[in-house]
Image: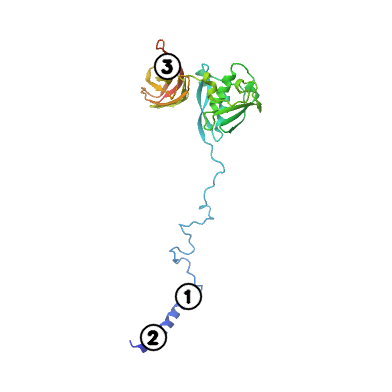
Amino acid sequence: MDGARLAASRPARALAAALLSLALLSACGGSGREPSGAPSRTGTPVGTPSRTSPDPTSPASAPPPVSATAAPRPVRAAVYFLHEGRLSAAPRTVTGPATAAAALRALLAGPSGVERGHDRVTAIPSGTALRSLAVRDRVATVDLSGRYDDAPGASADARLAQVVFTTTGFPGVERVRFRVDGGPAAGLGPAAGGRPLGRGDFEDLSPGVLVESPLLGETVTAPLRVHGTANTFEAEFRLRVSDGSGRTVADVRVAASSGSGTRGTFDVTVPYRAAGGPGPGTLTAYVLSAEDGHRVVLDTVPLTLAR
C-alpha cells in the first residue's frame, strides 16, 4: 500500500474503534463497571466474597473467644502424715494455680480411710484451717487457725514437720514461717520465734529412707522408678518389691548421694517381674543389720503392681 492510501485509512480505523467502544459502553449500562457475575481482574466474580479473604465481620470468620483466665490444671502433690512416728508421703490431686495452698488444705483434712488402714496418722488437730499462704524469697508464710496450737506437747514438732514437708514439696519453697490467727506461733516450739523452718530441722522425724515416689496406693508398672531421700550408713540401703503373697519380685542395692549423718538423694529404676494380673504389692526400703544381718525396715509403701 502506498503512503497516500495508508494515511487515508488511519482516520477510518480510528472512527471504527471509537464507535465499537461506545457500543460496548452502552451495553454495560454506561457506567464503565464490569457487570455483576463477569470475571474481575483478580479472577473472582464481582459481588462474590473471596474464599481466601473472609469477611472479618462475619461470625463464621471471627476468631474464637479467648478466656481471661487459664483453665484449672490438676497437679499431683504429696502430703505428709506419720507412720510409726516418722514422716510418710501420701498422694493428692490438687487444682492450680494455688497448688501449695490446696495441698495444705488436703493435709489438714487428714488421712483417708485407706491411709488410716495402713497406719498413717496425723498430729495436726482436727478442725485446723489454713487462713493464708504467701511466698517470698523462697520462704512460705503459713497462717493457720488457732486450732493448730490447741494441743501443745510432744506432737508440736510433728505438726510443724507435716506442714514444712508438704509445703517445701513445691518448687520455689525452701522454708516455712508459721503464724497462728495472724500472730506469732507462740506455743509451737522451734516456730515460736518466727524463724523459718526447713526439712533439715526435722531430721529426727524423717525415716532413714524417705520414698517420695511412688506414693502410697499408686499403681505402678515395670520397671519401677523410685526416688526420694536417704540418710543411712555409707549412703547404702536396699529396695525390695514384693507381691500380695509376700513373694519377692525385685531386690536391689541403692547408693544415695550422701549418708552417714548427711541426707542425700536417690533416683533409681527397679525392674521386677510379677505373675498374673494387677494386684497388691509393697515397696520396702531396708538396711541389713551390722550385728547379725537381719533386715531393718526403714520405710514401706503399699502399691498396686501392674504386670
Of mark 1 and mark 3, the one earlier in the sequence is: 1
Q: Tag 1's secondary structure?
A: helix
Q: Label 1 belongs to which residue?
A: 25
Label count reads 3
Q: Secondary structure at mark 3?
A: strand
| Residue 223 x/y as whole percent | 38, 27
Residue 205 % position (x, y)? 53, 19
Q: Is residue 117 visible?
A: yes
Which residue shows up at 58% across the image and 30% down it? 140
Q: Hey, which residue is sitting farthest top in the picture?
A: 292
Q: What amino acid is at disc 3?
A: Val
- Work out how far the residue at label 2 is from the one at label 1, CA to CA, in angstroms: 25 Å
Mark 1, Cα crowd under 10 Å, few <14 / some 14-19 / many 20+, is few
200 relative to 36, above or below: above
Which residue bears the numbered disc 3? 287
Label 2, residues with CA under 10 Å away: few <14, some 14-19, many ≥20: few
Give amino acid for label 1.
Leu
Which label's residue is closer to the chain start, 2 or 1? 2
Residue 36 vertical position relative to residue 252 in the rendered view, above or below: below
At a point 40% along the width and 84% down the height, the residue shown is: 10
Residue 291 is marked as none
Q: Compute the Cα span from label 3 to label 2.
A: 117 Å
Instruction: Give whichever of discs 3 and 2 has the lower sequence position.
Output: 2
In the picture of the structure, the residue carrying the numbered disc 2 is: 9
Instruction: List x then y, in percent, for residue 174.
Output: 54, 29
